[in-house]
Image (cartoon, rainbow, N blue to C red):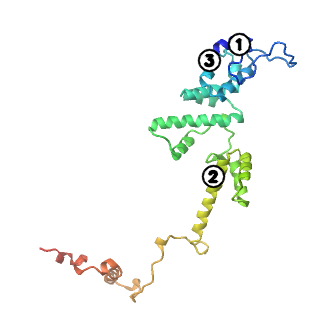
């Protein structure tokens, strides 16, 4: 049990988590650096508490982390430690206590190295609440609307605008590279991933999507003859063919002539029997 190891005032050197280095100075140690002051009635330094919180989070031991946080003394300076606050946010998220999660994230400033983790918690919590409210999973559009409705607080965001979850700085690097080489090699993709903070898969997908958009734009342009200001039209909206029946121009015909010309030019009407025309329908219906 955690409470048996983390006893107030304990100087035990037992390590219950395996991954954590010794939290207290070993007997006979020759360390010359001054020992950090212990927390009142607890026996741990603030740095040691932060170390335990980080290790338990990385190991996914959320229940142990929650018990450890519960055992901490009522010391305001300790509870304002960034690692402790992040641990509390993680526990609140896993327990579905989103109100407490939002309170922690909005009212405390966090360093940039913790932003990705805390941003993910913020967004996932809002996604879960939206899905419960709607009664169905969110799609890409639904998640986008949630992000617009609940923007990241400045406490976990550096203020740089993002597009499709890519920071503008990362997109600028990718665009510059694409300008001289739309087909980066695997090694170059790895280098771009390191430079942009993205994964290799994200870099590959960005180049693939950009090439597809450019090909679609080029295909659309080929349907035009290059005349400035020309509007490209689809084949379904081509200009009407020239008059091939030797009839006079339409603008010189009377209304009756136009009706007759339309009936003649329509293949369905032209080959229909007389009784199928509107003027002959009364005669075609037997009395």
Tag 2 secondary structure? helix
**Label 1 with label 3: CB-CB less than 8 Å:** no
Q: Which residue is mark 1?
A: 42
Residue at 67% x, 45% y: name it: 199
Q: Quadrant of the N terminus?
A: top right
Residue 112, how many percent across, how many down? 71, 36
Instruction: Specify the quadrant that holds the C terminus.
Output: bottom left
- Give neighbour class at mark 2: few <14, some 14-19, many 20+ (Cα, 10 Å): few
Q: Looking at the image, can residue 170 be seen?
A: yes
Camera-near label (2 vs 3) is: 2
Q: Indicate left or right for 260 with 169 as reference.
A: left
Res. 205 mark: 2
Q: Quadrant of residue 242?
A: bottom left
Q: Is residue 140 above or below residue 51?
A: below
259 vs 91: above or below: below
Q: How far apart in space, not on screen, are marks 1 and 3 (Cα)?
A: 13 Å
Report x, y in % for residue 59.
65, 28
Residue designated by label 3: 70
Most extreme residue toward the bottom is: 246
Asked which quadrant contains residue 85, the reply is top right
Estimate the spatial distance between the alpha carbons at disc 1 and disc 2, rounded to whole Å. Answer: 51 Å
Badge 3 marks a residue whose secondary structure is helix
Q: Is residue 234 above or below residue 144?
A: below
Q: Residue at x 66, y 29 (%)?
A: 58
């Amino acid at each position: 049990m955690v409470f048996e190891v983390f006893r107030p005032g304990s100087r035990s050197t037992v390590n219950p988590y395996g991954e954590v280095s010794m939290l207290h100075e070993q007997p006979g140690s020759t360390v010359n650096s001054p020992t950090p002051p212990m927390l009142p009635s607890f026996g741990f330094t603030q740095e040691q508490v932060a170390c335990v919180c980080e290790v338990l989070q990385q190991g996914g031991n959320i229940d142990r982390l929650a018990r450890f946080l519960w055992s901490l003394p009522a010391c305001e300076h300790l509870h304002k430690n960034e690692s402790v606050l992040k641990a509390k946010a993680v526990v609140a998220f896993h327990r579905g206590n989103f109100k407490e999660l939002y309170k922690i994230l909005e009212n405390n400033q966090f360093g940039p190295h913790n932003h990705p983790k805390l941003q993910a918690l913020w967004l996932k919590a809002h996604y879960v609440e939206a899905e419960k409210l709607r009664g169905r999973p969110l799609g890409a559009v639904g998640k986008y609307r949630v992000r617009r409705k609940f923007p990241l607080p400045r406490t976990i965001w550096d203020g740089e605008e993002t597009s499709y979850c890519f920071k503008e700085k990362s997109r600028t690097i990718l665009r510059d590279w694409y300008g001289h080489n739309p087909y980066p090699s695997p090694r170059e993709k790895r280098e771009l991933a390191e430079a942009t903070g993205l994964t290799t898969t994200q870099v590959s997908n960005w180049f693939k999507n950009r090439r597809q958009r450019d090909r679609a734009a080029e295909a659309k342009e080929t349907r035009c003859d290059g005349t400035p200001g020309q509007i490209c039209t689809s084949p379904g909206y081509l200009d009407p063919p020239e008059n091939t029946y030797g009839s006079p121009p339409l603008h010189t015909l009377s209304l009756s002539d136009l009706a007759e010309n339309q009936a003649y030019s329509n293949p369905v009407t032209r080959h229909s029997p007389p009784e199928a025309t509107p003027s002959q329908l009364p005669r075609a219906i037997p009395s």
